[in-house]
Image (cartoon, rainbow, N blue to C red):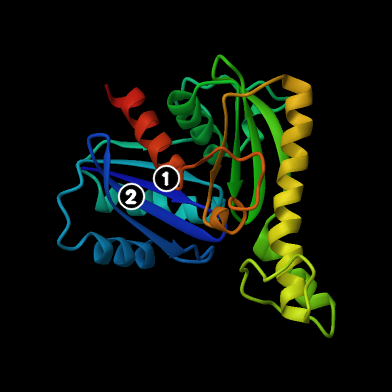
Amino acid sequence: MLLAVDVGNTNTVLGLFDGEDLVQSWRITTHARATGDEMALTYRGLLTNQPTVTGLALCSTVPSVLREMRPMIAESFADVPVVIVEPGTKTGVPVLTDNPKEVGADRIVNTLAAHQQYGGPCIVVDFGTSTNLDVVSAKGEFLGGALAPGIDISLEALAARAAQLRKVEVLKPRSPVGKNTVEALQSGAVYGFAGQVDGLVDRIIDEVGPVTAVVATGGLATVVIGESETITHHDPNLTLTGLRMVFERNTD
């Protein structure tokens, strides 16, 4: 069984693969100051009563967590092959940006999975702490993209800076014209972020030409996909799938 681990700024997503089949997954909070011992206890708890892990694939956008995870993995998973996606790891994804080393490992992994499953050129929209739009060429190259503040942090910033506003549950309101503060905030979040994504996708297509797919992933994708006019696929496990593919490329 392969354990795939995607460490994001807000959440960490873990998945167990039996071959190509994702048989179990978990989403836990990422604690940037957690120690390796604390993470080891968490992982042991999640993996209790699960099949034996025979391989591990990891990507992280949080350097402090990755630093603590390295010795934890070396101790807790000492007998299994481990692949950490970082500069030098064989991914099969050419990164055509000014500074390839600054591109997040999750974006590279998403590029691989999207191209393998949906062809190219395509666009990946990852709704996480930030909203990432990644552009994949017909050859599977990472061409670059756009980064915007994520839904949650945008609403948190608004609530923190506006005395009479507060953070609300992000749901589709009765109407785009909110009749109260909660509905007005929900309208701005749901329709506003859908419009932001659609506008960026349209501009990217104007630049690169038609695409085979616009793939939404990330924990907050469900907030927007129903109102977006450009998203064609929802793949919540895209990053985990990409980690499985990278692991296979580096262990075959």
Residue 176 drawn at (x, y percent): 76, 65
Q: Nearer the viewer, residue 176 or 126?
A: 176
Q: Is residue 19 left or right of residue 237?
A: left
Look at the picture and state if 116 lies above or below 23.
above
Q: Is residue 98 left or right of residue 107?
A: right
Residue 184 drawn at (x, y percent): 77, 73
Q: Nearer the viewer, mark 2 or mark 1?
A: 1
Task: Name the image quarter holding the N terminus.
Answer: top left
Q: Nearer the viewer, residue 120 or 190?
A: 190
Q: Is residue 233 left or right of residue 27?
A: right
Residue 250 drawn at (x, y percent): 34, 25
Look at the picture and state if 158 lies above or below 60.
below
Number of marks in picture: 2
Residue 18 drawn at (x, y percent): 21, 40
Q: Give the residue at the far bottom of this rendering.
A: 164
Residue 42's image quarter?
A: bottom left
For badge 1, the amino acid type reads Asn
Q: Give the residue at the far front of this rendering.
A: 175
For badge 2, the amino acid type reads Gly
Residue ID at (75%, 33%):
202
The answer to whether the residues at label 2 and label 1 have Cβ atoms under 8 Å apart is: yes
Look at the picture and state if 9 lies above or below 209.
below
Question: How far is disc 2 from disc 1 in space, using C-alphas?
Answer: 9 Å
Identify the residue position indicated by label 1 in the image. 237
Give the structural element (helix, strand or loop) at label 2.
strand
Identify the residue position indicated by label 2 in the image. 15
Q: Nearer the viewer, residue 229 or 241?
A: 229
Give the structural element (helix, strand or loop) at label 1.
loop
